[in-house]
Image (tube, rainbow, N blue to C red):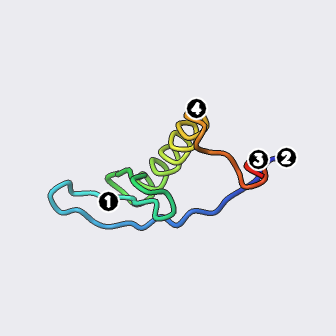
Amino acid sequence: MTKYLTYLIQLTYDRSYKGYVADVVNLYGCMSQGKTKKEAVENAKKAITAYMEALEKTGKGKTVEEKI
């Protein structure tokens, strides 16, 4: 069964980078950036995918049902 999850992405403008930092609040350490808000959000989506794949490979991404 495929599950769809919702993630909160906090965008912050970084003056030194001259673009936006996208922090995925629900996933510790999952961040990305982009020159525009749209680019930052798209890059954050890619970061979420990579984050979830890493959890799956390390075995840390098991769901509650799998742990029971």
- Crowding at label 2, few (<14), some or many (≥20) Cα neighbours within 10 Å? few
Determine the CA span between mark 1 and mark 3.
37 Å
Q: Which residue is mark 2?
A: 1
Q: Position of residue 8 (x, y in %)?
A: 52, 67
- Crowding at label 3, few (<14), some or many (≥20) Cα neighbours within 10 Å? few
Q: Are marks 4 and 2 in contact (CB under 8 Å)?
A: no
Residue at image position (55%, 34%) is: 58
The residue tagged with tag 4: helix, strand or loop?
Answer: helix
Q: Position of residue 59 (x, y in %)?
A: 60, 37
Q: Left or right: 48 with respect to 10?
A: right
Q: Indicate which label's residue lies in the foreground, 1 or 4.
A: 4
Q: Name the kind of residue labelled 2 in the image.
A: Met
Q: Indicate which label's residue lies in the foreground, 1 or 2.
A: 2
Q: Left or right: 26 with respect to 20?
A: right
Residue 20 marker: 1
Q: Earlier in the sequence, mark 3 or mark 4?
A: 4
Q: Which residue is mark 3?
A: 66
Q: Which residue is mark 4?
A: 57
